[in-house]
Image (cartoon, coloured by chain):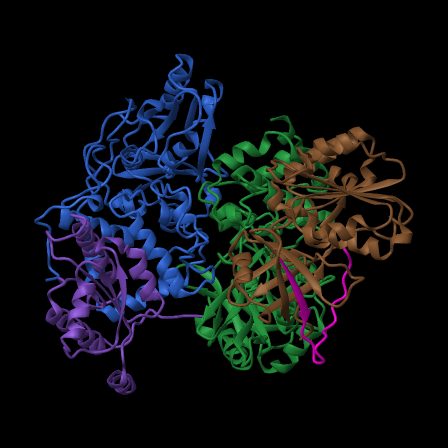
Chain colours: A green, B brown, C purple, D blue
Amino acid sequence: MVDQTKSRIIEKNRLTELLDKLAQDYHLIAPVRDNNVSFRRVESGSEVTLDYINTVLSPKNAFFPQTETLFRFSRDDSRGFRTEPGAEADREQVIFGIRPCDARSLRLMDMVFNGQYKDSYYLDRREKTTLIGLACFDPAETCFCPTFGIDPASGEDVDILLSDIGDRYLVEASTEKGAALLDRFAEFFAELRGDEEQLREARKAGLAGMKKLDVSAIADKMAPLYEGDYWDSIGMKCLGCGICTYLCPTCHCFDIADVSLDEGGERFRCWDSCMFPEFTLMASGENPRPNRKARVQQRFFHKFKYFHDRNGELACVGCGRCLRYCPVNIDITQIIEDVTSGKAGNE
Amino acid sequence: MSENIYLPRMATIQSMRPETIDVTTFRVTIDGSDGTGKFEYKSGQFAEVSVLGVGEAPISITSSPTRPEAIEFSIRRVGELTNALHELEPLDKIGIRGPFGNFFPLEEMEGQNLLIIGGGIGLAPLRSVILNVFDNRAKYGKIDIIYGARSPQDLVFTSEYKEWQAVDNTRLHLTVDRGDEEWKGNVGLVPTFLREINPSPENTISITCGPPIMIKFVIEALNELGFSSEHIITTLERRMKCGVGKCGRCNIGSKYVCLDGPVFTLKQLEEMPSD
Amino acid sequence: MQDTKEVQTEFKPKILAFCCNWCAYAGADLAGVSRFQMPTDVRVIRVMCSGRVPPELIIRALANGLDGVMILGCHPGECHYSEGNYLTRRRAHVLKRLLSYIGIEPERFQLRWVSAAEGAKFSAVVKETTDKITALGPNRWVDKR
Amino acid sequence: MKATSEEVQTSVKKLFEDGSIGHFIGYETGSDSLHVTPCFLKSGQAASRLVWNPLCANNLSKYLLDFKNVEGKVGIMVKGCDSRSVVELLKENQIDRDKVFIVGVPCSGIVDREKLLEVLGISPGEVVAVEDDGDAFLVTIKGGTQRVDKEKVLRGECLVCKYPTPLVYDVLLGEAVSSLPWVGDDYSLIKEQEALSSEEKALHWNREFSQCIRCYACRNICPVCTCTECIFDKKAPRWISKANDVSENLVYHLVRAFHVAGRCIDCGECERACPMNIPLRSLNKKVEKDLLELFDYTAGIDVEQQPPLTTYQLGDLDEFL
């Protein structure tokens, strides 16, 4: 149901103007079309495209950049070093156009970066970000987010949800942060006309046939597959590239390294992938995951068992990127089906 | 912004004691405003040691918290970072993060006999336990230390053996894979030596650390000798980076070695996947 | 645009020269001993043969912020190891064209033949290269963290 | 006549039966009717899974490296371009000719999925099948069949392919195709780029390289990237920083282009694998063009031919003096 008090509409022809305004007051991150559609920092509304199903790169870059300075260091007068932490998110940021699946992935990432040790870089950015989501009414054939209890038309994990209902967007704030932003830019939003709910329901028809797999018992069903041949054929096919993990909105593994410049340098972290052999290679030369099979296995066990054991959730949001962009067409939905149906155990 | 978990504290190398041709024990103090930075840890924990400009690596703490004057790390030259550490000199600065990970259950071990089995540089984390129990000698029963290395030249902490042997109700059993003319002790692999010594499992807890292949056969031997898997404790090595359970590479099944380990009982290991 | 021009007049390029031990390195020495005038913007790295310099090194140097890189080796037919310079010549042709394809001007990567007796040529080559690179301005591809 | 999936299935089955092969690498239908995926067989029983159609883009020859130490012969399906990378692998002694059984299929072009969907204005779920029909593809869509001109929807490398028929094979299925009618000047796009100013070129490639996420898919899929330890993975010395910035990405792409110089056969796999759509073929094609002009060399034609950068002639161009 549309909450009349917190909901507004914005005419489509006023959106660019709103984005211009947002770009002035915030770091605005929105989908941009270049060689592909990806979330980027934009300076004006005209750079933004909304003609896409989902971006190639998830917006995780905005919270957990591919390369991020942890701290800088410089030699002091004695034999020591001075250290100085990396840049904090200096301004509030707005992510515009995030899809419900990607928004859910942030909730999963929070579980990693929060906890006993708090990752201030990620959490700080998270805190300073307002999420403006875009409801998904035309999912791709590779989408399967309902599998994980995600409603592609819902604003559950965002601050504000926009739903395209033809000539205008229905705008719903679902958090205080979202409501505050709507107030701040009140001039762009108008009162509901009354037919919004109906228009939205009509658009939801496109979601009826979406793939929804039963994953209720997947973590338990993964356990016995640790031994056995199921992963052989997938490991055989896998090229060991980092596409699936880099594009995945829930993959969070990173490496830490130093750069040394004349009288100092910096320590940075950058995305890393469990698909790469050096990921677990120890200085001694030993590698606990020595082949592609072991690495592929780790990826799926992490998603469907290990993460679940630790955090009570599955580490997948059904965005379909790994399937869509895998050069050898490794199909995560097929793997889920094989595991849950018991087929994987019989191979 | 809250506390930065990736920012190391600066520390000063007070001394570097060569143990073998490629192992050095670094004695380190944490720099603090008053010159004595606090660093509270327990035996079995590790720290992330940095040489700024080169990198960072997890290193187990060799010293005992009962001797708080300095922290010690015994480090073998194996990779980029450990090589850089060996190039340093006393009074040079390094970075320290931690302590991280869990620790040996010394409190639960009170009143029991201890069987400490080490191989090569694997004695480093065990030395923390050894010194710790020596400093609380009355709380523990008989202590047997079985230690082996490839050759007499590869034994670490040799300068301390006399002191260790002099401690009440304590025996140090040394073995090497290959002896030389001067070596008068036992020659043979640690698991074989362990069988020969034939320690009783009664009221005894065994803790072991060493190369994976040694650990595997030591565990086999301990099982034969009748040690239950709750009473076999080991400490594991994995490639670690962040030390705080974020970077995702040190897991064995759903356990992160850096958070849930590095110390595990055999019983816990048996419940994990085999990689 | 005006600003760029002004910067260019102040610009002192950083140039790296890989000099073969058997020819150009001695040539450089001779140039020094003979007190030939030449710019001081070139840093020399001695290698045992021009054939020892793989393309990775050139690319790495340019990406690290050098404005120009030279390989100075023995004249064809004079390689101490018979054929090192011939192989380098082939690689250099391909590399130069590839660099140019992504916008690194061909002048920024030079392969020249300088014998041990050619002190004058060494200083001339250094001067010529420095002038050309000074005129081009800084390497566009630098984005060091 | 063109080879059909059925023909492939029958002949592979026979190869297993008569003991010619112990393994087979081919294609099977993937996650939907617009995708195929590599298929590894250990017996003829499952040969009915095999398909051959204009979606079979993958160059399977890279997988031969995984079968180096396997007992018996491994059978593999190759198109014209794929056969040229097999030639390169043979040239470099990466594989043993006696341990490989090559099933060649003449190829009249592979569909570029994205182009096809755009031209037809449909979503992938609507496609039922794609078949080759001379200078067009027959695309079966729910509710009918459409004929689409090949030139509009072919992959980039197929538009300039000079070797549609495998150059090395043990058995050839279907009739050889000598040339493809749409192929003209293979280097027209390269020449356009060459004509730009240095500033324009730098701007263009800066933009392209800044999009790279260094997933290494282009390297890992490349059939001639065969080093057991890649220079980019080496720790001492470290040639490249893991930090993702444009100058590191430049090092990555240039060094890679150089390392496959004289070995790249333009199968286009790097560009197909790239999730960021970086025009990687352009770099390789440039090197290919120069090697042809400078040393009259084309990779992947003749196993006996000496690779151009491992040899020289006294009379080679000497433009530096």
- Residue D177 appears in the picture as rendered: yes
**Outermost residue to the top:** D18
Q: Is residue C42 above or below residue D240?
A: below
Report the quarter where the N terminus of chain A lies.
Answer: bottom right
**Residue occupying the point 13% across, 69% down:** C119
Q: Main secondary structure of the magenta part?
A: loop
User: Between residues D217 and D308, which one lies in front from this camera angle?
Assistant: D308
Q: How many marks?
A: 0
Q: Kindly indicate the quadrant of the structure image that contains residue D177.
A: top left
Outermost left residue: D315
Residue D59 sits inside the magenta stretch: no
* Above or below for A158 versus D24: below
Instruction: Using residue A231 as the reference point, say whether residue D284 is left or right of it.
Output: left
The residue located at (38%, 47%) in the rendering is D272
Relative to D277, A182 lies left or right? right
Is residue B8 visible to us here?
no
Quick one: D294 or C67, which is closer to the camera? C67
Residue D30 vs residue D205: left or right? Answer: right
Pinpoint residue B105: horizontal percent, then vertical percent: 83, 51
The residue at 11%/71% (across/down) is: C120
The image position of residue A156, as x and y in percent, is 69, 61
In terms of depth relative to the viewer, which is nearer, B94 or D125? Answer: B94
Residue at the front extreme, as displayed: B182
- B88 or B272: nearer the viewer: B88
Location of residue B231 with respect to D257 vertically, above or below: above
B30 magenta-colored: yes
Q: Quadrant of the C terminus of chain A?
A: top right
Q: Is residue D51 above or below residue A285?
A: above
Q: Which residues are magenta?
A: B25-43
Image position, residue D97 (x, y; %): 31, 26
Q: Position of residue B110 (x, y in %)?
A: 89, 50
